[in-house]
Amino acid sequence: MSDVSLGLVGVGKIVRDQHLPALAATPGYRLLASADPHASLPEVPAYADMASMLDAHPELDAVAICTPTHLRHAQARLALQRGKQVLLEKPPGATLSEVEDLIDVASEQGVTLFAAWHSRFAPGVARAREWLAERRIERVEIVWKEDVRVWHPGQAWIWQPGGMGVFDPGINALSIATAILPQAFFLRQARLLVPSNCQTPIAAELSFADPDGATIEADFDFRQSGPPTWDIHVETDAGRLSLTQGGCRLSLDGQLSLEAEEREYAGLYARFAELVASGRREVDVAPLRHVADAFLYGQRDVTDAFIE
Ligand code: NAP
């Protein structure tokens, strides 16, 4: 099959940190153009908006949409209507209704739509899922803490409605938990800490339960200083699993089982190429549904203003 000719929409932190190195390392892609009101990439034709990029490059097969989350739906819808294969950065939309609509449009158009949960491509995730599949889950502890000033510098959108605040990284933990735990789980309690000058939480404590009574506690915090903590610990009827460093390190019963370098986006682009080649769609809304539940069901407490 010929290479997928790709346009990048939104040329911000994640594109520079992850998409460009992954595209350079993954066979099967040609980066043809980018769309962003201000930013551009060396030697890649640049357009101020996606529609202009699509008009100028009818030969584009696919777009990767990497803009702030509240812009996702309108841009993805337009690209799908123009017959493009679409990769959605996480989260796939600001609301569930938007994502359901995109699934419908992609089906009508017969094109690929890929909700790219990058954390699911972390090296330890597949092995963790296999190991847990044979066990009864008793207790899960998720700790996902990072410094917002390091990971989201200057991103005012994250504090606005649709920006999700600490759920922007927290949804990565939920994308792993929903992939590795063998049963569905349900929110029972949530506390969202919202800075007095923001619309979205800077920290969140969530309690879930599964139908067999396992408890799943999640602690998300944007106020971490120093290195991030991206850990999931699972107690089962037959041992303990720790998936740490964002899924790069897996320990089973206290023994190191796997430790590997982070190459999530290479895996993600390889998966998108497979989906495009086979004309399939892959859109799992489970992580976004948990975040929506937290906003629906959570207690909201106001905390100190956030000043970057
Ligand atoms: P970002 O640095 O703010 O980048 C977003 C880019 O999109 C900015 O250059 C922005 O330009 C541009 N943009 C705004 N409106 C646009 C439009 N209408 N058309 C085209 N481009 C537009 O944000 P980011 O960190 O890269 O995050 C983008 C998405 O990736 C988010 O959904 C986030 O959840 C996800 N993500 C981020 C990370 C991370 O660590 N940062 C990790 C994984 C996934 P202006 O700045 O001029 O508005």
Image: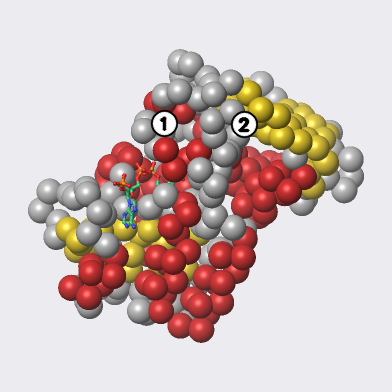
Mark 2 neighbour density, 10 Å: few (under 14) some (14–19) many (20 or more): many
Give 178 or 257, whichever is nearer the viewer: 178
Question: Quarter of the image containing the N terminus?
Answer: bottom left
The furthest residue to the left: 43
Amino acid under label 2? Val
Residue 106 image position (x, y, % from top left)? 49, 76
The furthest residue to the front: 197
Residue 74 seen from this side: yes
Q: Is residue 204 left or right of residue 152?
A: right
Cβ of disc 1 within 8 Å of ligand 1? yes
Residue 63 image position (x, y, % from top left)? 33, 64
The furthest residue to the right: 212
Residue behind mark 2: 194
Cβ of disc 2 within 8 Å of ligand 1? no
Q: Is residue 111 left or right of residue 8?
A: right
Q: Residue at x 56, y 65 (%)?
A: 98
Q: Is residue 180 left or right of residue 222?
A: right
For residue 98, above or below residue 210: below
